[in-house]
Image (cartoon, rainbow, N blue to C red):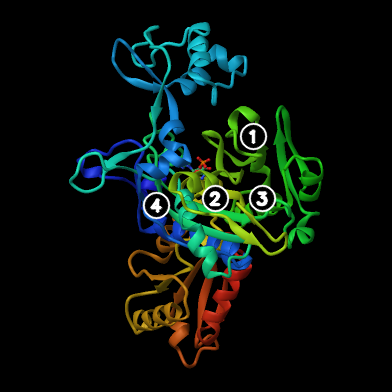
């Protein structure tokens, strides 16, 4: 986190007023990476599948969240200390207790009465006062509440997930596309949850970004057209106490580990996306969620977890939400949200499989797994981001700020920007120091304009030096071919000579 803040990946929100826990801004470098991750998701999960993207309001009237169940059920277990009056997440305190940890107690998802019993059983103390002063466990609704307009009683909330907006707009979107199932509708946007104890940086935030896809289909056909092509591919799965082991997506469906081809296909897409952004396969796995951690209407939830210095972190949850949300909204709004299905000649309420990815948690995992420590050969810490998500594709340096080298560097900078590459011009400091600064934020290529570039008598005239981040090797490339070659390197993920 220290490196992330120093190098403009992240900035604690409202910092100059003393920041509140659970809120982070993205600095210029962080924003560039985050947008590239979001655009990769758009390309892989929406554009390549022929799905649609919409954008819905973040402020949602109470009626919507009563229908979805959030107004009543979207709560975390809370305990209050009678001494210091501080409030804590009951399940977290239990899981952090030494004895409970030794016995492998899993408190998440348990009802308040069972959590209160565990607090007594393990004599869990208030973390501030170190005394047995914790209250009985109760519920705390995690939604941020507000009022629409000046008239009291017009209660609304900051949405706790982007998904609900998609269910509300479903009928209009499907009508625009011939009212035909299946259809995929996605959204990238902010959600907010008033977490009791936000912690671990980007892992538990109060405001964060989700990338959610709702895939609507007729439940009589749970196949997916492109599944056969990928059924033999493998990923790592965890089920119950069975540690991560390789399973093909085909096997996952046939053994019931995953409820259908649709979900298995989206798991495959997530796995490939995570590999593309730099998470090693050995550091992630899918976990089939146990019944007590799955909503009653769900026909199966599978999380994608990544190993981090904070432990394993759920970064994407995929749920078979059935027809629950559309049925609830139809009932509460009085609107018909069913679709006439051509294949079965019946009106049905579509079922939904939902892959829901948190950008911030994934961003954090990318930072951790791409971080490289100092070595005897390289006296600075650096990031090995894949070029497709690096904050800049290249940095451009004139060897010196004189004799026309700076002018030529500026010319090249403009040409590369015109070609759609993200580049940045740097002229201060020695070349070695500039390489180090580029490495420190994970820029994959550095371009140097030197005397040879401009010297018409040199056999290197009209070429520049391109240095590769990962092995510091250098090649000369013709200026006239630079944009095309760099774009090719980015596409191929080339980071060494
Ligand atoms: N629509 C389903 C849904 O919202 P979720 O498992 O609650 O499911 C999905 O959230 C993803 O959103 C998580 O896997 C995580 O990446 C991200 N997320 C949820 N709560 C978060 C928080 N407090 N801070 C950061 N990311 C969070």
Could you tell me which secondary element the residue under label 1 belongs to?
loop
Q: CA distance from mark 1 to mark 4?
A: 32 Å
Label 1 or label 4, whichever comes before in sequence order: 4
Residue 453 is situated, as x and y percent measured from the top left of the image, at: 46, 84
Q: Can you say which quadrant of the picture contains the C terminus?
A: bottom right
Label 2 or label 1, whichever comes before in sequence order: 1
Read off the residue under disc 1.
289
Could you tell me which secondary element the residue under label 3 belongs to?
helix
Callout 2 crowding tier (Cα within 10 Å): few <14, some 14–19, many ≥20: some
Label 3 or label 4, whichever comes before in sequence order: 4
Callout 3 crowding tier (Cα within 10 Å): few <14, some 14–19, many ≥20: many
Residue 451 is situated, as x and y percent measured from the top left of the image, at: 43, 82
Please give the label number shown on residue 267. 3
Label 2 or label 4, whichever comes before in sequence order: 4
- In the shown orientation, is residue 181 left or right of residue 79? right
Q: CA distance from mark 2 to mark 4?
A: 13 Å
Read off the residue under disc 4.
9
Query: Quadrant location of residue 217?
Result: bottom right
- The residue drawn where x is 29% and y is 10% is 83
State the residue in front, 172 or 119.
172
Up the image or down, 433 lies above or below 380; here it is below
Residue 375 visible in the displayed image? no
Could you tell me which secondary element the residue under label 4 belongs to?
loop
Label 4 lies in ligand 1 vicinity (Cβ under 8 Å): no
Please give the label number shown on residue 370. 2
């Amino acid at each position: 986190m220290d490196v992330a803040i120093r190098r403009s990946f992240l900035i604690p929100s409202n910092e100059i007023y003393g920041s509140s826990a659970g809120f982070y801004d993205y600095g210029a470098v962080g924003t560039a990476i985050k947008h590239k991750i979001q655009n990769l998701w758009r390309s892989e999960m929406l554009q390549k599948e022929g799905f649609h993207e919409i954008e819905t309001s973040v402020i949602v009237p109470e009626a919507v969240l009563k229908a979805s169940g959030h107004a009543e059920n979207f709560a975390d277990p809370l305990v209050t200390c009678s001494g210091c009056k501080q409030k804590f997440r009951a399940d977290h305190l239990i899981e952090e207790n030494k004895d409970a940890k030794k016995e492998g107690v899993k408190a998440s998802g348990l009802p308040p009465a069972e959590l209160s019993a565990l607090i007594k059983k393990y004599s869990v103390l208030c973390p501030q006062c170190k005394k047995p002063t914790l209250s009985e466990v109760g519920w705390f609704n995690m939604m941020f509440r507000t009022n629409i307009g000046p008239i009291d009683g017009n209660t609304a909330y900051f949405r706790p997930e982007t998904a609900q907006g998609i269910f509300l707009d479903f009928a209009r979107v499907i009508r625009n596309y011939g009212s035909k199932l299946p259809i995929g509708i996605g959204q990238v946007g902010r959600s907010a949850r008033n977490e009791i104890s936000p912690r671990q940086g980007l892992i538990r935030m109060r405001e964060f970004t989700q990338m959610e896809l709702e895939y609507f289909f007729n439940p009589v056909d749970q196949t997916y057209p492109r599944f056969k092509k990928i059924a033999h591919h493998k990923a790592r799965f965890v089920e119950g106490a069975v540690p991560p082991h390789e399973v093909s997506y085909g096997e996952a469906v046939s053994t019931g580990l995953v409820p259908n081809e649709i979900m298995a296909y989206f798991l495959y897409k997530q796995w490939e996306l995570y590999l593309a952004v730099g998470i090693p396969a050995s550091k992630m796995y899918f976990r089939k969620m146990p019944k007590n951690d799955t909503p009653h209407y769900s026909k199966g939830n599978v999380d994608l977890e990544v190993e981090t210095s904070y432990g394993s972190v759920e970064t994407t949850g995929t749920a078979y939400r059935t027809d629950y949300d559309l049925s609830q909204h139809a009932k509460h709004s009085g609107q018909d949200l069913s679709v006439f299905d051509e294949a079965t000649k019946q009106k049905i309420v579509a079922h939904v499989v939902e892959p829901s990815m948190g950008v911030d948690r994934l961003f954090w995992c990318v930072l951790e797994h791409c971080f490289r420590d100092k070595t005897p050969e390289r006296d600075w810490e650096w990031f090995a981001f894949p070029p497709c998500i690096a904050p800049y594709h290249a940095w451009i340096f004139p060897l010196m700020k004189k004799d026309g080298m700076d002018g030529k560097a500026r010319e090249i900078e403009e040409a590369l920007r015109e070609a759609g590459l993200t580049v940045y011009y740097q002229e201060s400091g020695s070349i070695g120091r500039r390489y180090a600064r580029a490495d420190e934020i994970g820029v994959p290529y550095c371009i140097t304009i030197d005397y040879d570039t401009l010297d018409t008598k040199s056999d290197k005239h009209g070429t520049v030096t391109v240095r590769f981040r990962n092995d510091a090797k250098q090649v000369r490339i013709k200026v006239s071919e630079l944009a095309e070659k760099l774009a090719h390197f980015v596409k191929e993920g080339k980071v060494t000579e």
